[in-house]
Image (spheres, grey):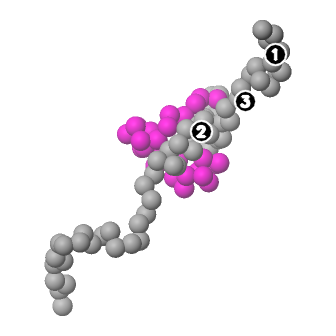
Amino acid sequence: MKRRKLTRREEKPAPRRIPREAEVFDRTGRSRVQRWRDIKAGTFPQPIVLGKNAVGWYEDEIDDWISSRPRRDYGTSAVTPGVARAPEAA
């Protein structure tokens, strides 16, 4: 059986993209301080040290974090069917 020679593109996967601070802010809406709090709590991806004063994040990890966020539901799910609501104060 003959083996097919791989091209350079097939041999190497594309490098992971590393967005920096400003782009991560634009994509997540999280301030720098809130991101660091979330990192410390383990709810946001760890940054990658790019240099003495530079960090970035793997784009695929940011995409996964965004897709894991719960969706806001504006439907009637706030009121559970069959459960009486408390009367509103006048």
Q: In this view, does 7 lie to the left or right of 49?
A: right
Identify the secondary structure beneath mark 3: loop
Q: Does 20 sit above or below residue 87?
A: above
Residue pointed to by mark 1: 4
Q: Which amino acid does the dot numbered 1 rest on?
A: Arg
Q: Which of marks 3 and 1 is in front?
A: 1
User: Residues at badges 1 and 2 in contact (C-beta under 8 Å)?
Assistant: no
Q: In this view, does 84 lie to the left or right of 11?
A: left
Q: Residue 14 carries which label?
A: 3
Say few, some or many: other residues with alpha carbon within 10 Å of mark 3 (under 14 / 14 to 19 / 20 or more).
Answer: few
Q: Is residue 90 magenta?
A: no
Quadrant location, the C terminus: bottom left
Q: Which amino acid does the dot numbered 3 rest on?
A: Ala
Q: Distance between the residues labelled 1 and 2?
A: 31 Å
Identify the secondary structure beneath mark 1: loop
Instruction: Identify the residue at image location x=59%, y=29%.
Output: 49
Identify the secondary structure beneath mark 2: helix
Q: Which mark is residue 60?
A: 2
Choose the circle earlier in sequence order: 1 or 2.
1
Residue 56 position in % (x across, y down): 61, 36
Residue 34 position in % (x across, y down): 46, 49
Q: Which amino acid does the dot numbered 2 rest on?
A: Asp
Q: Does 38 sit above or below residue 12?
A: below
